[in-house]
Image (cartoon, rainbow, N blue to C red):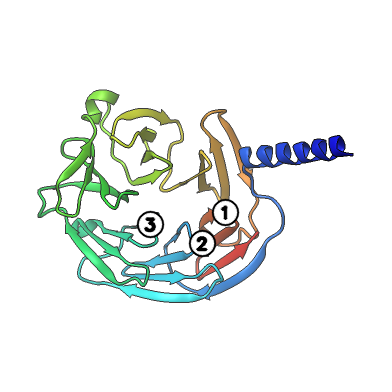
Amino acid sequence: MNKLSNSLRSLVLIGAILCLGSWSLQGGFRLIGSFATKANALALDNFGNFYTVANNRIEKYSKEGKLLFPYEEFRFGKVGMVDATNPMKLLVYYPDYMTIVTLDRFLSPLNTYDLFSMGYQNVSAVASSADGRIWFYDNVDFKLKKIDEFGKIFRESQALNVILGQTPNPNFIQERDNRIYMNDPELGILVFDLFGSYAKTIPIKGLKKFQVLQDQIVYFENNQLNAYQPLTFELKTLPLPDTTDLVHVVIEKDMIGLLKKDKVEFFAY
């Protein structure tokens, strides 16, 4: 009896490991919230909170699908991107004024970074770092850089135009699982280590934004959600609860957010 019980426990454990190693979106969906909005971007943090972005306004929603806090700022132009990697230090980038604003969990301003005043003239993409610093790409000397709150350079890559033999023009950066992923629609996704050293390029082109989940590149394209595994080169299409009027999709753990033309919907799965 003990031998049989031990065998069954082993089988269950092996099954659990296999499931974790091959992440996929399965099962049914349950609508947990829906709000009217004219947002043009959607983000999701590690706590399951959603953020909608509409020109100068950001709204935060709980994982239960409830509206929590708004944030609105007109001094720096339109919001270019929101990085919700760190829910306690949300990063908001205003490309027209090359200004970064960080917000706390209540969407109250913490710090403002004027990149132009720091000496940078052309910055196309920025991202939060796990250590509280900020990654960005300097289009003048073609380097990925990390700075602290005073603008001091903490890490930087080599000149990428020399390494790649081409000049990158990235539109999106994300730090995830001790890697930095920098997206160039023409070149693909450039991968760096935490020191800013270039490692490789993932050959997915034409993207505006993506997520990194369990070593897979998850992105919304052609009205569907795709997951690409760089190690095996496997590409999967993940099911969605609804594809009508979809603008963008974000996913994290057991939550998924659908941004549509006139509303945002949140689902558990």
Q: Are marks 1 and 2 in contact (CB under 8 Å)?
A: yes
Q: Nearer the viewer, residue 233 or 176?
A: 176
Q: Between marks 3 and 1, how big is the CA–CA gap? A: 16 Å
**Relative to residue 148, is residue 180 drawn left or right?**
right
Which residue in the rendered view is the most extreme toward the right? 1
* Residue 229 spot, x, y in % from top left: 55, 34
* Residue 137 spot, x, y in % from top left: 25, 42
Residue highlighted by disc 1: 253
Q: Nearer the viewer, residue 242 or 199?
A: 199
Instruction: Determine the residue positioned at 46% across, 35% down.
Output: 204
Q: Secondary structure at mark 2?
A: loop
Q: Amino acid at mark 3?
A: Asn
Residue 38 found in image quarter: bottom left
Residue highlighted by disc 3: 86
Instruction: Determine the residue positioned at 26% across, 50% down.
Output: 133
10 Å crowding of disc 1: few (<14), some (14-19), many (20+): few
